[in-house]
Structure formats: structure tokens, C-alpha cells
Image (cartoon, rainbow, N blue to C red):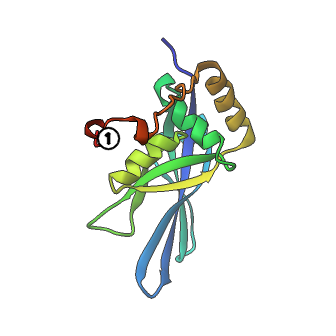
Amino acid sequence: MDRPAIDLAIVMEREAAPNQWEAWRHRPVEVVAHESAFGDAPRLLRDDGRIARVLHPGFRLELFRDECEGYHLNLSSGVPSWFVMWRSDDEDPSRAWPETLSVSYNEAGRLLDAQEHVDNLPLPQEVAQWLQAFNDEHYRPEPKRRRRPASFVSPAERTR
């Protein structure tokens, strides 16, 4: 079964000595539609000695039915976002690269729980509409279950 997908590229920024405590600061600054002219290897876009920007092509965002709750949470947050997980080189802290990209709030939470670097960027309106259309078709919220007040539950069952 084919899943809806889009091909993307991520621009990472590296700032030299942003403050007295850091030698380097890395962050994703833009997610753009992939173009064949980008090739498949990272490309330096700019480096003035203080700020460098590198384009990382070749990311594919696929939508999965079992992630619809995470998509719903992202879309209903007020500011829908891309979630970019990136890593840096332990031996050369001036190097960092994006590893994965998501639009699922739950997936971003799992990555953060695993102590990964995850930054968010605003989701363009056309991508948010595409995601909303997928979610409208596939998301079924779990029905709310009525919980009995604890006073009506036997003491033995209250600790469960």
C-alpha cells in the first residue's frame, strides 16, 4: 500500500562561539521541498567564518495511519511544526547533521525521551493542509470511557 509522502531537504546552521559557554551552536533553520538539482550529498550554502549553512537533501516524509494521533496533536497545537532530529559529532563538535524529520507530536516526544536533539520549525500552510486531509480521512479518536468515582469502587480495586 502506497503511503502519502513528500521529499524534502533540511538546512542546518552552525554558529561559531555564540556565547562564552559554547564553541558551536547547531540548529535546523529551514525545511524545503527537495529538488533534483540538490543532488544527494550535503552542500555548503554559506560560510562567513561565524555562521555556516549546509543543505542536507534526501529526506522523505511518509504519513502512517498509526501516527494519526500525533499528527492531530501537532495540527491542533496552534502552531503546526516540523520536528527535526539531529546529531552532532562527538569527536568534531563543529559538525552536525539532521537524522530524521517528522510531523508527529508523539514521535517527537519519543525522540526527546531518548535524549535526542529535536528542534521544531513552522510547518508551511500547504503542508499542514495536506497533513490535515490525511488526518481527516484516517484519524479516529479513542472513545472517552466513563470512569467510576473512587467512592463507588471497592477498596481492594482502588489501588489498581
Q: Is 158 situated left or right of 85 in this image?
A: left
Residue 91 lies, with reference to residue 85, above or below; the image says below
Q: Is residue 105 visible?
A: yes
Q: Classify residue 140 by image quadrant.
A: top right
| Residue depicted at x 69% and y 49% | 78
In the depicted structure, whether residue 150 falls above or below residue 137: below
Residue drawn at the location 49% of the way across and 38% of the way down: 58
- Percent coordinates x, y for residue 159 in the rendering: 28, 43
Quadrant including the C terminus = top left
User: Does residue 127 appear to the left or right of 71 in the view shown?
Assistant: right
> Does dot 1 land on a helix, a strand or a loop?
helix
Amino acid type of the residue that numbered disc 1 sits on in the rendered structure = Arg
Foreground pick, 12 / 41: 12
Which residue occupies the extreme top position in the image? 1
Q: Position of residue 18 (x, y in %)?
A: 51, 80
> In front here: 103 or 138?
138
Q: Position of residue 143 (x, y in %)?
A: 54, 25
Above or below, comparing residue 95 to residue 84 in the picture: below
Given residues 91 and 121, the one toward you in this image is: 121
Which residue is located at x 65 percent, y 40 percent? Answer: 75
Residue at the bottom extreme of this rendering: 20
Residue 124 percent across, percent down from the top left:
70, 44
Q: Is residue 10 left or right of residue 152?
A: right
Q: Which residue has dot 1 on it?
A: 158
Q: Residues within 10 Å of mark 1 (few under 14, many from 20)?
A: few
Residue 63 in the image: above or below residue 25: above
Residue occupying image coordinates x 66% and y 24%: 136
Residue 41 in sight in this render: no
